[in-house]
Amino acid sequence: QSTMWLEQTVKTLLALAREEVSPQPAAATLVLPVLERVIVEQAILLEEKPVTVEVLVPPTLHVALPAPILHILLSNLVGNAFAHTSAGSVKIDVQENRLLIINNADGNDPAGRWESNQAFSKREDSDGLGLGLNIVRQISRLLGYGVEVESELGRGTTFRLVIPQDYLVEPGMRA
């Protein structure tokens, strides 16, 4: 199964590079199973950190996206939150048509450095390659999604993936 996911991810990234990701809704994908898989895959970034993870995504929530694309989006957003939270919590929630990835850092955590109009770029203190959030931005742009960010120094960062209404197959989300 890992080989299949890797193959689908490579195909998605190649399509993205050629801007062939369709802006039309695809078959419905349940969000929670993909999110759970992402959390398990990214959990290594939380090893030996006093960080709790809270998931408030309804089990019936579907989005009209292929699972590999949803996986790429979630992997990059959740991985970013896990990597940049040294203590505190990461909360994954849904409000209206927004999927929220919130890292609530303790007062000493440098995670909150984003500004709402800041370009997604590699931070100086990051061990990553600086590609993940740019991939999220590019996929979101091609699909007509929005990405919002709100941050407060020392308090954490909230990334909101704004899902167009026609991508919500079962909009049973709480307000």
Image (cartoon, rainbow, N blue to C red):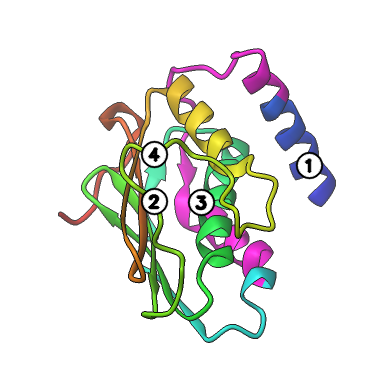
Q: Which one is earlier in the sequence, the residue at label 2 or at label 1?
A: 1
User: What amino acid is at disc 1?
Assistant: Leu
Residue at the (45%, 74%) spot, across then down: 109
Start-end of magenta stretch: 14-43
Q: Are marks 4 and 2 in contact (CB under 8 Å)?
A: yes
Q: Which one is earlier in the sequence, the residue at label 2 or at label 3?
A: 3
* Residue linked to disc 2: 114
Q: In the drawing, what numbered circle is on residue 65?
A: none
In the figure, 137 relative to 17: above or below?
below
Q: Which one is earlier in the sequence, the residue at label 3 or at label 4?
A: 3
Q: Report helix, strand or loop for mark 4.
A: loop
Q: CA distance from mark 4 to mark 2?
A: 6 Å
Residue at the (54%, 41%) spot, across then down: 121
Q: CA distance from mark 3 to mark 4?
A: 16 Å
Percent coordinates x, y for residue 160 in the rendering: 34, 47
User: Disc 3 vs disc 4: which is toward the camera?
Assistant: 4
Q: Report helix, strand or loop for mark 1.
A: helix
Q: CA distance from mark 1 to mark 4?
A: 30 Å
Q: Report helix, strand or loop for mark 2.
A: loop
Q: Are marks 2 and 1 in contact (CB under 8 Å)?
A: no
Q: Is residue 149 left or right of residue 126?
A: left
* Residue linked to disc 4: 118
Q: In the drawing, what numbered circle is on residue 77?
A: 3
User: What amino acid is at disc 2?
Assistant: Trp
Q: Is residue 139 left or right of residue 162?
A: right
Residue at the (50%, 61%) spot, across then down: 81
Q: Which one is earlier in the sequence, the residue at label 3 or at label 1?
A: 1
- Whether residue 27 is visible here, answered yes or no, is no
Residue at the (58%, 58%) spot, across then down: 79
User: What amino acid is at disc 4?
Assistant: Gln
In the figure, 137 relative to 23: above or below?
below
